[in-house]
Amino acid sequence: MALRNIRTEEDPVLKKVSRKVEVFDSRLHTLLDDMKDTLIKADGVGLAAVQIGILKRVVLIDVGDEHGFIEAINGEIIDRKGEQREIEGCLSLPEKSGITSRPMYVKFKAQDRNGNWFEAEGEGLFARCVCHEFDHLDGHVFTERLAPGERIRISRD
């Protein structure tokens, strides 16, 4: 297992659409393990493969709730309800944040590391994180989802 470099907003790879995963093998398992190490080291709640320069439809989510650590491959949202407006940030835009408008509840289907399909659902931070990471797979970042009237906030520590 190895730490991977998280790409930042200047990197054009973040605007690209990720490809469907077709092969579920040891290379994919290594990618998932490396992404987990990278996410933990960065102290984040989600990471998409595109954020480390890999254009595959792979995301990791761990918001510290009852869902635990989720590996979602080839995921798609199949239901969304409600609305939440909360502050959001991104490991690829480290000094930026802003209030986004996201669904309060989402349900998605995805494959695990062995290609088995599963479904998961949740509310609040979990729903926001799922939407955020799945957006990355289609070349979008949270700054495109700011709530009406909101601006990007810059913080310099």
Image (cartoon, rainbow, N blue to C red):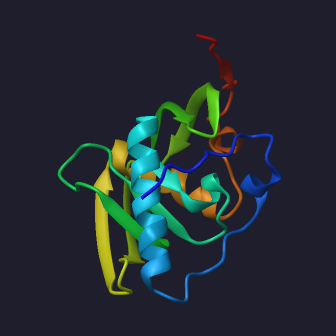
| Residue 11 image position (x, y, % from top left) | 79, 47
In which image quadrant can residue 142 be found?
Answer: top right
Identify whether 35 is placed above or below 38.
below
Q: Tell me: 2 left or right of 61.
A: right
Query: Could you tell me which residue is drawn at 46 percent across and 56 percent down?
Result: 35
| Residue 97 image position (x, y, % from top left) | 59, 27
Please count the marks in the image: 0
Q: Tell me: 151 left or right of 130.
A: right
Res 98 seen here: yes
Residue 28 or residue 64, whichever sits in front: 28
| Residue 25 image position (x, y, % from top left) | 44, 85
Query: Could you tell me which residue is drawn at 69 percent across and 26 percent down?
Result: 149
In which image quadrant can residue 145 be found?
Answer: top right
Q: Tell me: 5 left or right of 144.
A: left
- Residue extending furthest left? 66
Query: Could you tell me which residue is drawn at 60 percent across and 28 percent down?
Result: 98
- Residue extending furthest top? 157
In which image quadrant can residue 80 be found?
Answer: bottom left
Identify whether 125 is placed above or below 86.
below
The N terminus sits in image quarter: bottom left
Res 81 seen here: no
Query: Could you tell me which residue is drawn at 38 percent across and 48 percent down?
Result: 104
